[in-house]
Image (cartoon, rainbow, N blue to C red):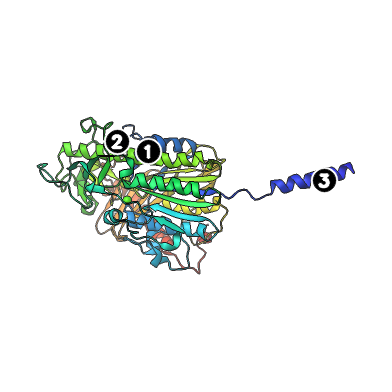
Amino acid sequence: MKSLNIILLFILVGTACNQPAKKLNVLFIISDDLTTTAVSSYENKASKTPNIDKLAAEGVRYTRGYCQYPVCGPSRASFMTGYYPHATTTFGYVSGRENIGPDRKTWSQLFKDNGYFTARVGKIYHMGITDHMLGRNGEDDEASWNERYNSIGLEWKAPGEGELVQGNPDGTLPIRDGNVMTIVKADGDDLVHSDGKTAQKASELIRKHKDEPFFLAVGFFRPHVPFVAPKPYFEPYPYNKVIMPEKVEGDWDDIPERGINYVTSINAQMNETQEKKAVAAYYACVAYMDTQVGKVLNTLKEEGLEDNTIVVFTADHGYHLGEHSFWMKVGLHEESVRVPLIIKVPGKKPAVCNSFVELLDMYPTVAELAGLQFSKHLQGKSLVKTLDNPAHQVRDMAFSVTQGGKTFLLRDENWAYIQYDEDAASGIELFDMKKDPKQFTNLAALPKYAQVVSDFQEKLRAKLQEVRTNDLEIDYNQMKE
Ligand SMILES: [Ca+2]
């Protein structure tokens, strides 16, 4: 009888242990145009991001995360659908839905179709500045969400102290709209602006839906231009204390014409004071956004949801803050393509992972963590192994494209290889990232590196062939193994 009791006890304990664990929530937070060089837990100590840093200290911080296209629209379409821009032919400002068709599920849609409450607050798919000021959905995908909320921002029209630092050489022009570096040290508090409202709505949704599994996507608009934030955020960043990136004589001489970024200190007619003001204002906007991140994470903690919520923080692409006298994004140089990426998973130890990872890896990673079956055709790779073993290498290189898919980056441990056109007709850049991390010396034309260039050309051909394989008949993941 005693032994029967013991057996029964084992069965009971076993059953209790096999109870399905409470479903993991997903809190996905994305900043717009945030480069790693403005996040203090990455390399910049001038810009302070205590809330992102706290998350980084509690989660896994990926030091080599790369976007798939350094422009809002196509980058977001890629990671939300789970396909490379070349696979979905999405190089523009679209959600990617038309490209993947009605049957394939986006990242959040997979959760929605598995009984999760899914909501978007702010900018997840592309949303232009005007959409944002008018509270429009932009290039959103309705099927991805149960609910969606737009946080209206006054942007460059916000009352305060305004200044235009781009295309204003005499400093006499008033601030203006558009995708330009306009600064507004705004009157009022955090809630005057979109990101403050986004944090508030996100917190409200967390509290409302805490008893059901949720996938909440929170898209902050800062530090995207215009550089608008409440005035106090500018105070820690006096522009005259800003140290600009090193400038090298003749830096542009070995960069192909198409490699000169679309916004530069030359074509934007920025003097050194204006350059410093742009960097200081960017940092102020990062600080404002960071504070909003803190509010959302704090709500998660207050509601006791930290133990069953996966938190992902990233940005859609990087940003130039005067490196090579370049500004903003679009190009494939390091500061424009590299992104902060932090994943915090309940029960996993904090770590730093140096493997190359791509934004489209987020979808399969989070789906796997939640125990959801996802399409084998997704082109990202799960990062789950890196959460237990941060030394695990997921990829040996990262791949990104720009200029309508006609310019390519392969970035590995030693090299950054940039090729303009599939036949390289418009040039090549090759940088030794160990010796020349700031990318000052293009080695592509030197005979000594001919073999390295030729190897990369072959790798690029193979990579393009691979990413274009998006046929439902082919089991893509099996093909790669
Ligand atoms: Ca962006």
Quarter of the figure with residue 434: top left
Residue marked by disc 3: 7
**Badge 3 amino acid:** Ile
Query: Visible in this render: residue 373?
Result: yes
Mark 1 and mark 2 in contact? Answer it, CB < 8 Å.
Answer: yes
316 or 211: nearer the viewer:
211
Distance from disc 1 to disc 2, alpha carbons, whole Å, reads: 10 Å
How busy is the neighbourhood of tag 3: few (under 14 within 10 Å), some, or many (20 plus)? few
The earlier-in-sequence mark between 2 and 3 is 3
Q: Nearer the viewer, residue 299 or 399?
A: 299
Q: Residue at x 28, y 48 (%)?
A: 447
Identified at 55% across, 44% down, the residue is 308
Residue 4, image x and y in percent? 86, 45
Q: Secondary structure at mark 1?
A: helix
Q: Give, as a three-letter code, the residue at label 1.
A: Thr
Q: Which label was assigned to residue 291?
A: 1
> Which of the numbered marks, if any, corresponds to residue 233?
2
